[in-house]
Each structure stands twice: as C-alpha cells, then as structure tokens.
Image: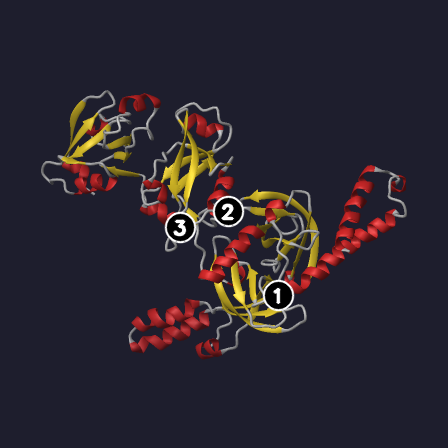
Amino acid sequence: MKKFLTNLTLLAFAAIGSQSNANDELPAGITPIQLARALNQAFVGVAEDVSPSVVVIRVAQKPSPEMDEMDETYFDMLPPELREPFKDYFEKSQPDPEPRAERRSRSPVFDGQGSGIVLRPEGFILTSNHVVENAEQVKVILQNGKEYPAEIVGLDPDSDLAVIQIQAPDLTPAKIGDSTMTKVGEFAIAIGAPFDLDYSVTFGHISAKGRRVFSDFVMMDQNFIQTDANINPGNSGGPLVNIEGEVIGINTLIRGMSTGIGFAVPINLANNVANQLIEYGRVRRTWLGIGISNLTDVYKSSFLSYETDLTDGVVVTDILADGPAANSNLLRKSIITEVDGVRVRDVQELKNAIRARAIGQILKLKVEYRGSTKVVEVEAGEFPRETGLARIYERSPQSSERAGITVETFVPSENLSDELYELWKNDDLKGLVVREIDPKAPAPVQKLQSGDLVLEVNGKKVDTLSEFERAFDEYSNETGASLFILTRKAEEKFIAVPAEALEP
C-alpha cells in the first residue's frame, strides 16, 4: 500500500507542476483530489510507521561541580575559624542558595530532553551525544507512555552521537535506510519531541548533502545532511526519514531558530558509530596522520610551487611526525586523486574513503607530485584516542625556532621551491631547511636565507627538530653557538651566534 501511495504522490507533483488542468493527463479513474489525498495519506502513513521506533529521552543533568569543588578544595585550605563563615557567605551570594545537604540529597530533576530511535530489539537506542553527555540519570519514554531507566553505553563527541540502553519488551527497531542514495530535493520527515511536545512531525526536503558546520577541532566527523524540515530543540537524536519510512539521518542541530536550516548525521555514518559504541564502548577511527585541503587556485599558486593541470583533488599540507603516513613515501604538497582506485575530488570524499577502511589496512593512494603520477601505499592507523586533533598537532611540530632561526624538517623533494629542489634533490643530503629569519635576530644570523640548510649546531649533526633544539640547549654561556650551513648557493660556511642571543 505504501509503495502505491508513494507512486501516487510523485504522480501528483508531476501533474500539478506541468498542467493547469491535471484531469487532461491523469490516469483513468484518478482525479486531482485523489492524488492530494494520496499525498496526505503518504505522510500520515510514514508517521504512523516510524513513531513506534522513536523515543523521548529525559535527562537529569549532573549537579554543577563548582560548589562541591569549593567545599573540598578552597574552603579546606582556610583556617578552621574562617571556614564556616566563608562557606555561609559564598552560599548566600549564589542565586537561590540551597543548603549543601539538601542539594546533594535531592531527587534528580529531569529538565533536559531529546529524542532517539530504537536501533536493536535488545534495547539499544541511538541519540545525540549532546543530549546525554552530562547526564546523571536518563530515562526513556516510549510511544505507549511507558518509562524506562536507561544506561549510557557509549558517547562520541566527534560525531555528536551516543548509544543508550533500556530493558523493555517488544521494542520496534527503526527501519534503516541508505544515506548514500539520498538525493537533494527528496522529501524529508523529522520526528521527535521539540519544546517538550512529544512525537511531533515536520516535513520538508533534503536541501544539501556533505555539509560542514564546525572546524575539525570541534567535531571530526562532519558530513551533514541539510534539510528545511523544521528541527527544533528536543528533536536532537530523533530520526530524519524518507518517504519510504527509512531513517536516513539523525537530527543533530539547527542553524538559528525559524531559519529552515537543520542538519542531520547521515545514517550510514551514525550506524557505523553506533555499532562500534555497542561493541567497544568507543569509536575506533581510521586515520593517516596528514593535513589536507581542497585543491584550489590559491593552493596552486602559493603552496604547491609547481604546475598542475588537475582541477580537483586533495592537497597534502602536512604529514604528522607520529602519524601513519610518516612511515610511507607520501610527500607534503602531493595531490591525492584516488583511494584504492576510487576517485576523490575533495576533502570530504577523501575522509569518507578513509573512514570506510579498516585499521591496519593498506591504502593505495594515487597521487600527483611535480607532474608525475604514482601510487603510494599507506597503512591506516587508529586515531589516538587519548588526544584531540589539536593536541596531535601540538605534539607533532612541523618547525622549530632558536636564536631567531625557524627551521623545518628537510625533505629534498618536498618543502622547497622549484629552484631549490633542483639544487637539493640529492636524497643523501640531510639537515634542516631554514624557513624564515626573525628581523630582530643578531647580525650574523641575518646572513642566513630561506632555503639554506643547517647541517650542524655546535659540531653536532642536526637532522631532526629535537636534535636542533637539544644542540642549542647545550650551548656555552661564554662562546655562544656555531652553525655549519650549506647555503642555497651550495657554499659551506660557519655562522657564529653570540651567547646573548641565546638567552631565554
């Protein structure tokens, strides 16, 4: 029946959009009002089919730790005779002060709300991370009104997804669709509990796919479906479904109230994250340890320093020192065009391709570098769980500065201009390449130029940034430091850095 209604719905829009008098082209026995009723019934049918799989989530947030931290740390450091007076003063200075004993013993207040979908009959429910991440207690309300306490199975801030579990009989899992098959312009239906209004239904269309809203430092997994179906506070974690009643996304955020711009995590990504949270309690992400950017005219002219006929692809901007790609032949300034034979045109396509690979799998990257094309193999690693992306960059410096000299790791075919590349393309040559000189550096240092190579500091070879820094840290207070330089004119020279320039 649903398929019949769907077909009638599509026919209705085709007829209304192309004919002033729809009766002229309608199938025999079908009238415009029948088509309108079929469209109406199609949306009603989707809501009725999907709603049993949608849940309302009520959350009691953890009490603010501010008072407890003050109780346990600051106040305990005061002399006994001052402790209680200060505690009383602090409590009275707070809005609506509440005695500590009552605050710690009071019943949880379920003042947070979101939505979710039943993922498995065992009671696993998929929702948004931000709905339950700071929860002291969580309860789930089914469509039949029954309430169940829930346990958090796993949280994943990088995709804003979470899995919770309840013990309840006769649950109806949602019908999962394929978000890769979703097309812009299709109907989209959002079901959830906005503004404490349980089981509300809104509909619209898919406005766009592959949207990014935050930087990777805020959220790594971004490939949002954009919709104009109204998504309001409380809808978070609820389903975005198609006309077939299949979940194609998990509603996650809105861009301003009443703007008609909402975002959902594609269900393929959400399902993968949920399965890992259920199996491991966390998400094991595949990564290569590289910085990337879309190939643009700006990168062509200012970053690559060589000509390319490519119009799309992904530029490798950095290779992290402790990432998987550091052990491969992949070079900075390479342009990735394929992963395992599949074309990648931009950063999102590359991320999707890498995300779909298993940890430990060998990826074959087709890259272009300085006019030549080759395949580079990189073993996919697991993204370090204990650190965020910002910390990885912090602990994997690409350059170092001492005495006004900024150097970076020297790879002959990687970080040089065409002129210097021809000069330094000998693979046996090692050292650190001078990137820039501080205008306030001492006069001897000012003689250095970008592109010169630092081979030794104080008679010690420096092939790595840590060796460079360590050599400077061991300088003599009396004599300063000496640098052995191979200039960009292929001349060898010593540069003396006075001791006063090395003082911290």
Q: CA distance from mark 1 to mark 3?
A: 33 Å
> Which of label 1 and label 3 is nearer to you?
3
Mark earlier in primary sequence (3, 2): 2
Q: Is residue 232 visible?
A: no
Secondary element at tag 2: loop
Secondary element at tag 3: loop
Q: Quadrant of the N terminus?
A: bottom right
- The x, y position of residue 437, in whole percent, is 27, 31
For disc 2, the neighbor class at 10 Å (few under 14, some 14 to 19, many from 20) is few
The residue beneath circle 3 is: 383
For disc 3, the neighbor class at 10 Å (few under 14, some 14 to 19, many from 20) is many
Q: Nearer the viewer, residue 440 or 317?
A: 317
Secondary element at tag 1: strand
Q: Which mark is residue 56?
A: 1
Q: The residue under label 3 is which amino acid type? A: Phe
The residue beneath circle 2 is: 214
> Which of label 3 and label 2 is nearer to you?
3
Up/down of 417 relative to 77, above or below: above
- The x, y position of residue 256, in whole percent, is 60, 50
